[in-house]
Amino acid sequence: MIDETNISLRPSEKLDILYRLFNEENIVDMIDKMDNRGVIGLQKFVWETVAEFGIITRKKHFSRKEITRKMTPTPQYQKSRGCTERSYYCKATQCIHTNPECARMKIKEHVRVMAESMREYVQIERQNQAIEETVLEKY
């Protein structure tokens, strides 16, 4: 089993992900080009980045549920895939080794949802910047 705490992407991979997120480009297609370790690292990095940016833009109004509520709940996902494993087992760090195709599909959905949330946060931040610039121009 992979130790999730030791998984890290190369700086160039992180930069590529950040570039794509801030330019509203697809990052889901990166998953097909990565090994299992890279896929887990991507999911972890995107989650951390989106959560951090959510906190920056939404401040006290941010909740991780804002993102996770848009994801298919694990029991529902498992049922749709005909999986009979316990819900706890349906984690990327475990299932990616026994059923990588299924795990990658789930991770793709999660990454897609997180990228959509990031787009929302970037738009909020751009609006905030525009408001600040307008206020500064008046004074």
Image (cartoon, rainbow, N blue to C red):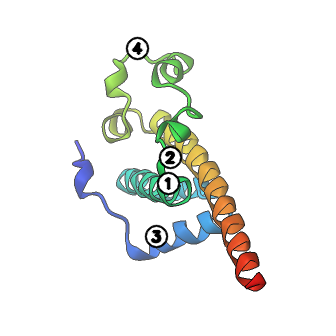
Q: Nearer the viewer, mark 1 or mark 3?
A: 1
Is residue 127 depicted above or below 75 in this figure? Answer: below
Label 2 close to label 4 by CB (< 8 Å): no
Q: Residue at x 42, y 58 (%)?
A: 45
Q: How far is disc 1 from disc 4 in space, using C-alphas?
A: 39 Å
Q: Which residue is mark 2?
A: 62
Q: Is residue 98 left or right of residue 105?
A: left
Label 1 close to label 3 by CB (< 8 Å): no
Please state which of residues 117 and 18 is positioned toward the viewer in this rendering: 117
The disc, 2 or 3, on the residue closer to the chain's N-terminal end is 3
Is residue 122 depicted above or below 134 in this figure? Answer: above
Place of residue 97 in the rendered image (x, y in percent of width and height, measured from the top left): 33, 39
Is residue 14 depicted above or below 28 in this figure? Answer: below
Q: Is residue 137 left or right of residue 66?
A: right
Q: Which residue is mark 4?
A: 84
Mark 4 is on which residue type? Thr
Mark 3 is on which residue type? Glu
Q: How far is disc 2 from disc 1 in space, using C-alphas?
A: 6 Å
Mark 1 is on which residue type? Lys
Please state which of residues 124 and 67 is positioned toward the viewer in this rendering: 124
